[in-house]
Image (cartoon, helix red, strand yellow):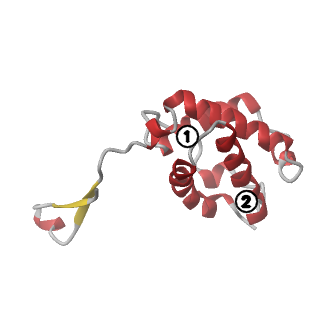
Amino acid sequence: MNRLLAISVPLFMLFAVPVRAEDTLFADMGGQVGIDRIVDASVDNYLADDRIKAIFNESNIDRLRAQFKVQFCQVAGGPCQYKGHDMTIAHKGLHLTNANFNAVVEDLQAAMDKVGLPFATQNRFLARLAPMQHQVVSK
């Protein structure tokens, strides 16, 4: 349930701060164990997908998996703190297209299906990742 909490500091009197009910997405995804399974399955999918596997040719796959696990944990509302590059810097020079982005999302969805994550939970997670599209796609 979203509620608005009015702040009584004079400078902020025109603004309201949303107060969110407890964020359960991390737990609904199976906690860190669930996130790890999703990341491992999705990275396997990326590396097997002829549409996008070349993007990962220069990547340290173990580091990539580790970074995704922390980032997905944070995005899902877990206790992790992603300290890697922001998405614009991380993808600079890769000249990624909407087709590349869509392939990654499709592979992620297939991974979430594979580990048995309910569709509604998948959608909640994808909704949090969607804004990154503008930071990743450069063509």
Task: Report helix, strand or loop for mark 2.
Answer: helix
Residue 47 at x, y = what percent?
A: 82, 40
Which picture quadrant has residue 92?
Answer: bottom right
Left or right of residue 6, residue 25 in this image? right
Q: Which residue is mark 2?
A: 102
Q: Nearer the viewer, residue 52 or 30?
A: 30
Residue sitting at x 86%, y 53%: 51
Residue 65 at x, y = what percent?
A: 68, 33
Which amino acid is tagged 2?
A: Asn
Q: Which residue is mark 1?
A: 71
Q: Looking at the image, tell me whether mark 2 or mark 1 is earlier in sequence order.
A: 1
Which picture quadrant has residue 69?
Answer: top right
Q: Residue furthest bottom?
A: 14
Which amino acid is tagged 1?
A: Gln
- In the rendered view, tell whether residue 73 sits above or below residue 110: above
Dot 1: few (<14), some (14–19), or many (≥20) neighbours within 10 Å? some
Give the number of the mark in front: 2 or 1. 2
Dot 2: few (<14), some (14–19), or many (≥20) neighbours within 10 Å? few
Whether residue 83 is visible: no
Q: Nearer the viewer, residue 120 or 4?
A: 120
- In the rendered view, tell whether residue 47 sits above or below residue 89: above
